[in-house]
Amino acid sequence: MAPDGIGVLLRERREATGRSREEQALFLVRLQDGEPFDAGNLKRWEKEKRLPTPRWYQLLAEGYELTVQEIVRAVTASRRWRRATRHADGVDGEEETAVKRRSFLSVAALATGITAVPGIAEARTGINAGLSGSDAGDLAYLDGAFERHRGGYHGRSPVVVLDQMKADLNLLRDVLGRPHPAGIRTDLALTHSPSIMVRALLEMDAATCLCSDGDPTSAVDKAVDVWEKLPPAYRGGLIRTRAEALRQVLPGAAHDRLEEALATP
């Protein structure tokens, strides 16, 4: 677990208030005007079994008296620690770079399909490094850019917000317009092992059937199991598309659980 990561940050801030995880979860529920919050999320985040996704950044910042930027930096440190640990365990560097590029392009494409992404200008260095394959790339800023500014101006004037949006759109247009080698473009949609992917796709389709039959708990159990068994280099293309489609139709806690699994590198 990263010494400067999100797990240590959340645990130390919570313990400083004298709250248990259950008490902290109830505190977050109050901040959400009574919307349920699973205390199990806090345990997974503190132990870094999972990392919080951007949808939780604002709530965590408010609930732990931190800024969103501090949350993002801590999540980034945890992701960097995971990458370093995987490299130490012998994960191939080229596969890791390909996965990082897939992650970047997926998020960027999603962003352009929704709205402007304020905050991307802050990540220029990280984006450039990510596209070059450098481990210094900090793609968490891009992941959280939309979430950081969702829900209002947050004390900023409309003029400032619009200026940021304009700058962000210009940057995003520049990034998406950069040429990528043919091999990388192919890897964004395809994988290298048909046998692995066929089995995974069949299992993911079975999970979708369970959801259609009214059993979201079994559906998410199967989907998460399939996802976690796949090597990181095989989590792109059709399998991610199927998993994302299932995530969109899952309700409540099942939706959140699959979302967290898909956000884990």
Image: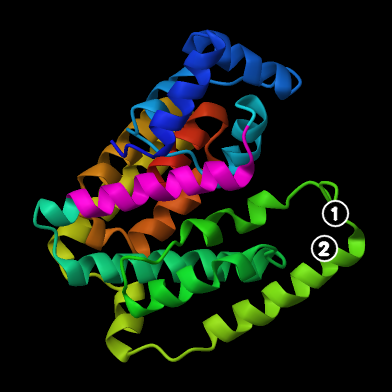
Mark 1 Cα shell of 10 Å, populated few (<14), some (14-19), many (≥20)? few
* Residue at figure coordinates x 68%, y 73% from the top left: 168
User: What stretch of residues is rendered in magenta?
Assistant: 66-85
Q: Does 178 sit above or below residue 90?
A: below
Q: Nearer the viewer, residue 236 or 34?
A: 34
* Residue at figure coordinates x 84%, y 68% from the top left: 162
Numbered label attached to residue 161: 2
* Residue at figure coordinates x 64%, y 21% from the top left: 28
Q: Nearer the viewer, residue 255 or 150?
A: 150
Q: Does 201 sit above or below residue 22?
A: below
SS label for mark 1: loop
Mark 2 Cα shell of 10 Å, populated few (<14), some (14-19), many (≥20)? some
Q: Position of residue 190 (x, y in %)?
A: 29, 73
SS label for mark 2: helix
Q: Main secondary structure of the magenta part?
A: helix
Q: Can you name the residue that lies furthest to the left here?
A: 90
Snapshot quadrant of residue 249: top right
- Say if residue 264 shows up in the picture: no
Q: Give the labeled residue for mark 1.
A: 156
Left or right of 104: which side holds 118?
A: right
Q: Does 132 sit above or below residue 197?
A: below
- Say if residue 85 shows up in the picture: yes
Residue type, numbered disc 1: Arg
Q: Position of residue 251 (x, y in %)?
A: 56, 33
Q: Position of residue 83 (x, y in %)?
A: 26, 54
| For the residues bearing labels 1 and 2, Cβ distance under 8 angstroms | yes
Looking at marks 1 and 2 on the same chain, the residue that comes earlier in the sequence is marked by 1
Residue type, numbered disc 2: Val
Left or right of 179: which side holds 201?
A: left
How far apart are the two marked residues, 1 and 2, measured between alpha carbons? 7 Å
